[in-house]
Image (cartoon, helix red, strand yellow):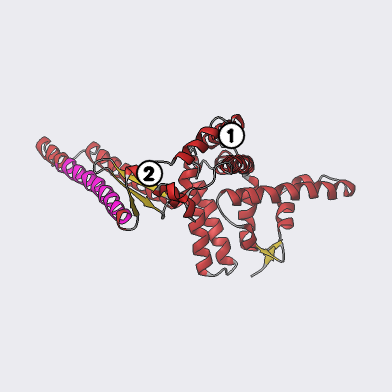
Amino acid sequence: MKYINLKQIVRQTHEVELDTLSQDDYADRFKKLYDHDSEHLREVMAAVNFFPDLLKENGEYRIPIADGEFIQWILENYTSDDMKHIRKGEYHRVDINFMFTLVNGLDTLLKHLDVEQELRDVSHILVNQKTKYDEKVRLFNIQAEYMRLLHDITMLFEVPAFDLTYDDKMECLAQIDTLTEKYTDDARKIYSDIVKNREEIIRKNSYPITLEEIAFSDRKIQINNELYANEEFCMLQSELNEMKRNKGFLKHYEKERIRRERRITEIFKEIASKYPIDVDNMTKLERIMVLAEDAFSIHIDGATKEAYVYFDTDVSWFDEHDTMIWA
């Protein structure tokens, strides 16, 4: 296997422009192009949860020649509409073929680099968790099959069929209608059964908690009251929640999000330090919040008035919604 580095790919990408430059201007211009393209490549890979260090050896990019065009494709499409959606985390708006090119290209790149299968699988899982790629492909295939079925039925009944009577055609459509209705009912049942199964798993692997135990102690109420009387805290919290709804490009969003979250945490710690912890008067939920090492969610059954604390939760949800609860 032969390899090339990123400098060679950048040079190939901007060959037309670079060939017009004098020898004196070439070096400075190439350095600027390389720095920009290197940053752009890191940004795109970070946006899909891919680690560029997997492509490096001794700190330098080591790209199989067979994948050079793919890396060049990423650089050339940096400002395209689909890549902008990816850079903003708007994966649901990306064309399925564009997303396939990116995700499959990264998978293939690791394969050509002889990266261990287990590590490749982990990389694909991380990319998929971020982009929901596998989910999007399945939905696309289901929609395509529905459209193909509708097209086939329409075409069949537009083609002259002299041997079929009106009653024959109506009987055919009636049977297709019944079959379609059963199929959609079965599809809804599959989803419903999976939801029920998940709820059962949650109940079996969670900590039961009463609605009374979800309440906060007087200490927590005092801390909350002071937090939401703090203008800087409220301003930062409002800005953070607005940023989550309108992220823009992820590289800017992540930087500003971290800065605000750090300051919010500082304010919380400053206020909380005024109120000594009274373990004896802590509610069950507060003890869980203090002792928990991982994110958790609370499931409340409105019918039975039962609640469960569950730790095997998808933390990506928290980055998509307003954050207002503080431990």
- Tag shown at residue 233: 1
Callout 1: SS:
helix
- For this orientation, the residue located farthest to the right is 24
For the point 58% across and 34% down, the residue is: 233
Is residue 15 visible in this depiction of the protein? no
Q: List x then y, in percent, for residue 291.
A: 47, 55
Q: List x then y, in percent, for residue 6.
A: 71, 57
Amino acid type at mark 2: Ile
CA gap between label 2 and label 1 equals: 24 Å
Lower sequence index among marks 2 and 1 = 2
Q: List x then y, in percent, for residue 26.
A: 84, 48
Q: Where 91 sits versus 12, above or below?
A: above
Q: Where 68 sits versus 297, above or below?
A: below
Residue 190 painted magenta: yes
Residue placed most toward the observer, 238 or 156:
238
Q: List x then y, in percent, for residue 203.
A: 30, 54
Q: In this view, does 139 lie to the left or right of 291?
A: left
Residue 302 painted magenta: no
**Residue neighbourhood size for the residue with mark 2, other residues' Cα within 10 Å, grouped as few (<14), some (14–19), many (≥20):** some
> In which quadrant will I find the N terminus?
bottom right
For the point 36% across and 45% down, the residue is: 213
By secondary structure, the bulk of the magenta-drawn segment is best described as helix
Callout 2: SS:
helix
Residue annotated with mark 2: 214
**Residue neighbourhood size for the residue with mark 1, other residues' Cα within 10 Å, grouped as few (<14), some (14–19), many (≥20):** many
Magenta region:
175-202
Amino acid type at mark 1: Phe
